Every structure is written in structure tokens, then in C-alpha cells.
Image (cartoon, rainbow, N blue to C red):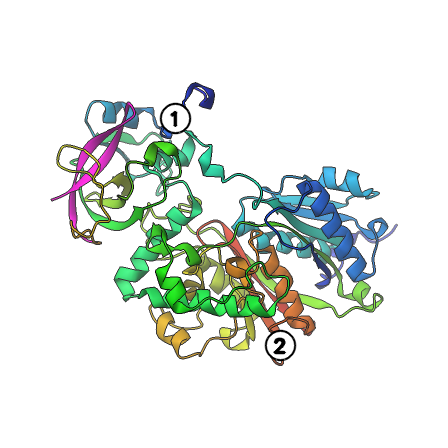
Amino acid sequence: MAAPLRVAKHRQACVVGIHALPFSKNIGMTERHSGGLAILGALADAGLTVRDLDGMFRYVWEGTTEMEMARILGVPNLRAFGEVDYGGGAGCPTVTHAALAIENHLADVVVTWRARNRGSGVRPWSQQYMATGQDQFERPYHVARPVDGMAFHTRVWIEKYGWTPEVLGRVAVTQREHARKNPAAMMQKPLTMDDYLAARMICDPLRLFDCCLETDGALAMVLTSAERARDLGVTPVYVHGFAMGSGPQMTAMTFFYDEVLGKTPNAWVAPELWKRTGLTPRDIDVCQFYDAFTPQIPIAFEEFGFCAEGESPAYMADGKNPPYNTSGGGISEAYVHGFNLLVEGVRQVRGTSTSQAENVRNVLVTSGNVVPTGALVYSKDPW
Amino acid sequence: MSDANLDPKTAFPVPVADADTQPFWDGVARGELLIQRCGSCGAWLWQPRPICPRGQTPGPTWTRVSGDGRVASWVVMRPPTLPAYADKVPFVVLLVELDEGVRLLGYLVDGDGAMLETDGAAEGVAIGRRVAVRYHDQGGTRLPSFTLV
């Protein structure tokens, strides 16, 4: 009798394929179409085919289920599949599930993807009148957009720590500079601090350039085991470790009704991530911080321990921080629920970013931070 | 009621109660602010729920509160997300921490419950300002809101 596989040692997962379709305001095809093309592109990047694919994980908000996508592509059999809820928070947790499936031998070649027609599609809140569940205490007060929830959080940091508009403007300007070096980025026009300050308020205290783009985009990533990667002739990007967290009393995008005010779920994710990886912020060479809105960057530097609480404005003004959101991020490259950050993190380890950092060993990627979320570290070296 | 019964040019979002939240909205209709309190540990609970999350005691008690509190955070709405808001912007939405400790949202209103067309500067809206509950009528729906005191 063969030994049961459950006793097999964990094996490390690594990213071996990435692909992004050109970002636009109107991609001219369905999400299942663009998502399928993104997956095929990522498989080709890895030197693999649909016949090799045996695992799929997606965001719950991804409109095409794993089964529909597997049918479209002709996947012979999915040995692992699943979904993680919500939009921006689901990125790193989805890759985490893919990595766990590989580590535990549930599947050998796993794909994750995000295809979203939000540039050509409608703004969800422009059609929503019936407010149920959590929404019944929010939406009737015009608290309907993600920016509304984030603006309440931002005000707390502004009044507690004396944030000036320039604290956020610096993030917008920095990310635009990155975008202008990245031909794939949607925003190529220069952005000055004066431009930032002069732009209209969307939900005061947040201005136009504090907000992410509205994008039609599709990206995918292929993961496999470190052992399998050696046969592929690609540069593996190792998934060093990951963590997930919701914090207490989670209400998506608001998260401000209970004892906790002035924290995001990353305050729970960060210690878990450092504990699981054995790393510290000093080991991180590049950050890809989830950026639906600019305040998420300084808050992330504080909550992941790069600087102390309240000190991010001085820390960033002095340039002590590692480079962040080197593709332009959600603010200036494209907004596809953070999947472009996951892909850019891979490029930084491969050495192929258009704003490449030097001597990259470890890259921190995070997901949306006032929703259930997660973070992960990619590494150049295996465990 | 479905979305189809509403005129999108004039309709506001409508709270849709369920069995766990109906007593709150019934109280609001009578001009009473009801918040759940755990009969076992005394914790005040928001949003409405069937079980106390502190000690897992079922069936918290709907309890009338004064509606006094302080501003915990606030924002100013500018571009309207629905046509019905077009002649109301700019207006302030408050996150209020009631004296009982729970936080809930409400418009900034005057002493009679009318929304103020303001960015909050003239009124000196800031975290920590004391507020009292008022009731604002929005297209036939009564919504708890708050006035500065």
C-alpha cells in the first residue's frame, strides 16, 4: 500500500508566470474573455499550457467562476479551487490560497486572476437604492462609495496626527512619477503638488488625485512548486510567507463602529506576517501597498512597523521609506483590485520593473486595508 | 419594495430593515433612539445583532438612549452620487460616538433636523465636538442625525 500523501512535507510555492492585458477605459471585451487571455498569457510566460493547469483561485467579486473559466480554457480537471470575499482585500489572500494548495500538494500548477471592466462599466453606487444589512445604516446617509469610508478614517489621522494635505499629495506625486516611467500605466501626464492641491474634493478630506483610477483591466499569475519551477527555465519568485486578518467587528470599508478607531485590519495582519516569515521591515526592499486611496500608504508604513504610529509623514518626507508602488499602483497605473501590485511585486524580484529597485531580495505586497485583507512577501531566494 | 418602484431622479437610498433591525427603525419613526444592550454583561452594541459578541448572550435588549455624544470623525460630501442629492451638496456626514460608547452615522443638521448646506467650516465641525440627536426626514424616511450643541 502506498504511503498516504498527507504525510508529505510542505513544499514551497513560487510565481512562474505573470501577464497583464493593456489597461484602458474600455477594453472592448467581456471579463471572461479578457480574464481568459490574461491566464493564457501568464501560462505562456511560465512555459506552461492549459493541460498543466490543475488549480484555480479567484476573488468572490471576480465575475467569472473558476468552473466557467476552466470550461472556457479547457482545463482537464481542477484539483484545487476556491474564492476569497470582497474586492481589494482579496488579492493577497487569493494568492495565499493558491500557495497553500501547492504547499500541501492539492495542485501543482495554480492560476489566480482578476479581470474587471470598471472603466467602461457603471459606478455601482449610482444604481443602488435598497440598502440592506450593513448598508442600511450607511447608504441612506450618502456613505456608499469606498472613498466615503476611507475619508472618515483619514480625518482621524488628520486631526490626531496633524496630517497636512501635502502628506497625501506626496504619495500621489511619487506614484505618478513611477507611472510615467511605465509605458503600461494609464496616467502619463506629469502631476505636481500644485496640481494635486488644486484638484476638486471627492469626499473631503480626500481629493481627486487621492483616488484610484477607473480601469478596464485583466491580469493573471501562475504559481507552481519550487521543484517544478526548476524544469521551466524561468526565474522563480518564491512566496516566502503570508498572513490574513479581519480585525474585530469588521464592516467592509467602514470598520469604525466598535472600540477600534484609528486602526485598519493590517494592524492585525502585520504581526502575523512578521511572525510567520521571520522577517522585519528592515528586510523589505520594495513595498507594493494597496492603494485605492493615498492615505493607505502612510498608514501601511505605520501599521507594518516601518515607522512608529503617527510618524509616517516625517518618515516619508525624509525619504527613509523603501520604494513603494513602483508601477504607479492603483492611483496612477491601473486599478484592478490590487492585482497589478501583486504582478509588479513579481517584476521587482525578477528585476524587470520600469522603476527597478537595487538588490531586491524581499518584496512586501498588501491588500485593501479597511476590508478583510492580507499581505505576503515574495523572495528571490527559497526557504 | 424593489428598486423598480423608485424614481431614480428623485429617490434617496432607503434602509431595508430585517427582523434584527426593525425595532431600531420603529423607534426612529417614534422619535426614539434605541440601541441594543446586553442583558448579561451590559455592553452597548452596534450595529444591531442577535447575539452579544462579548459574552455570546443571545437577545440583547433594545434600550432608549439620550442621543447625546461627540463627533468621532466627519466628512464633507461634494459630488452627489445620486440625482436626489444634487441640491443638497455640500453637506457633512458625522460619525458620532454616543455617550454609551457605540458609534453611528448621521447627517449634520440644525436644531430642527434640517440638513445644513455647508462644508463644516462655519460651524467649526471637529472631532470631539458635542452633538445631540435629531431626526431628518429624507424622502419620507426618518433618519437619526445630529446637531452641534
| Residue A104, label in figure | none
Distance from Cα at disc 1 to Cα at disc 2:
51 Å
Q: Chain of mark 1?
A: B
Q: Chain of mark 2?
A: A
Amino acid type indicated by mark 1: Val
| Residue A383 in sight | no
Q: Which residue is label 2 attached to?
A: A360
Amino acid type indicated by mark 2: Val
Residue that lies at the very extreme toward the right in this rendered image: A1
Q: Which residue is label 1 attached to?
A: B16
SS under mark 2: loop
The crowd level at tag 2 (other Cα within 10 Å; few <14, some 14-19, many 20+) is some
Q: Residue at x 81, y 68 (%)?
A: A230
Question: B58 above or below A98?
Answer: above
Give x and y (percent) for residue B43: 27, 41
Q: Which residues are magenta?
A: B128-149
Give x and y (percent) for residue A368: 50, 54
Q: Quadrant of residue A164?
A: bottom left
Question: B126 above or below B7?
Answer: below
Q: Residue at x 53, y 60 (%)?
A: A332
SS under mark 1: loop
Is disc 1 in the same subunit as disc 2? no
The crowd level at tag 1 (other Cα within 10 Å; few <14, some 14-19, many 20+) is some
Give x and y (percent) for residue A348: 64, 71
In the rendered structure, the answer to whether residue A175 lies left or right of residue B82 reads right
